[in-house]
Image: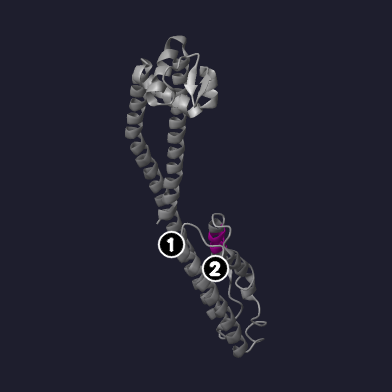
Amino acid sequence: MGGARIAVYALLLLVVLVLVEWGFQHSGNATSADANQVYCLAPSNQGGLVHAAVSLGVAAPGSTPRAVSVSGRKLTLMQWRAADDSGFHRSCDAYAAAFEPAAPAQGKQDSGIQQLLTILLPVMVGAFLTLAADDAKQASDRRWTQAGELRADWNAYQSAVESYVRRRQDTARSGEPSAADVEASRRALRATLLKIQSQHRKSPTIVGLQQDLDDDLGPAIANGWGKGDNGSDPASRNQRANEIRGCLETFGSSLQKVAGALERRIWLSSKL
């Protein structure tokens, strides 16, 4: 019960965490790259940048900040960055990692944040799944309660109709029996169906059950019996009683399908 809903919660949480982690890493990488570039292009560090490029084989020996030899061309630092962006950043990142004073502090800060996330994320996931499981249990309990109420109201209505039909079949009775109990139980059953429909609007079966309670199994139950005991024969009464019992049987079968679905599913199929 509720497994599918918990899975949806977990998937949504996973997507959020992945996006947060990606954003953090992307932001951190962009900030670090910008900081390295500023550091490498500082006048006092340009010589070290060119030396790193020569050491890595990106620039030819004899290069200077004003004449960086790259692919047989003599370029300024800005021209080098424009012509060979990957080589420039490779050299800059290596130089900054080796000599930039702020680099260790930045790495330490990033590591601290990652450690914090490592501790907090499992706690957040656990709390989120606990809330999702509790919500799913409450929804399951609510559906089981609705199924119980539906069956109880159906039993009361069926009993009232059967009692009324037997009294109408009894030719020894004088006068017409009251249908007050039938009407009271019918209204209670219809109210329960309406409450369930408010949460499962796509179920055509519930709509059909409500329609039956207004038509064949509604006030029309009192019709078709003839004019009093002396105005209709037993055969006609029995035929009318069998018609009503047939409607009850069909109605009860559909109602039990709805009650069973409430106990097994998160929502009712549009085909039920």
Decide which of tag 1 and tag 2 comes sooner along the chain.
Answer: 2
Tell me the residue that label 1 is attached to: 264
The answer for how far apart the CA atoms under marks 1 and 2 are is 32 Å
Camera-nearest residue between 255 and 130: 130
Helix, strand or loop at disc 2?
Answer: helix
Q: Amino acid at mark 1?
A: Arg
Helix, strand or loop at disc 1?
Answer: helix
Q: Residue at x 36, y 36 (%)?
A: 121
Camera-nearest residue between 208 and 60: 60
Q: Position of residue 5 (x, y in %)?
A: 44, 51
Quadrant in the rendering for residue 120 = top left
Q: Residue at x 34, y 38 (%)?
A: 122
Number of numbered discs on residues? 2
The range drawn in magenta is: 187-194
Residue 52 placement, left or right of 170: left
Residue 63 placement, left or right of 116: right
Q: Quadrant of the C terminus?
A: bottom right
Residue 58 against residue 272 in the figure, above or below? above
Residue 190 drawn in magenta = yes
Q: Main secondary structure of the magenta part?
A: helix
Q: Closer to the observer: label 1 or label 2?
A: 1
Camera-nearest residue between 189 and 250: 250
The tag on residue 83 is none
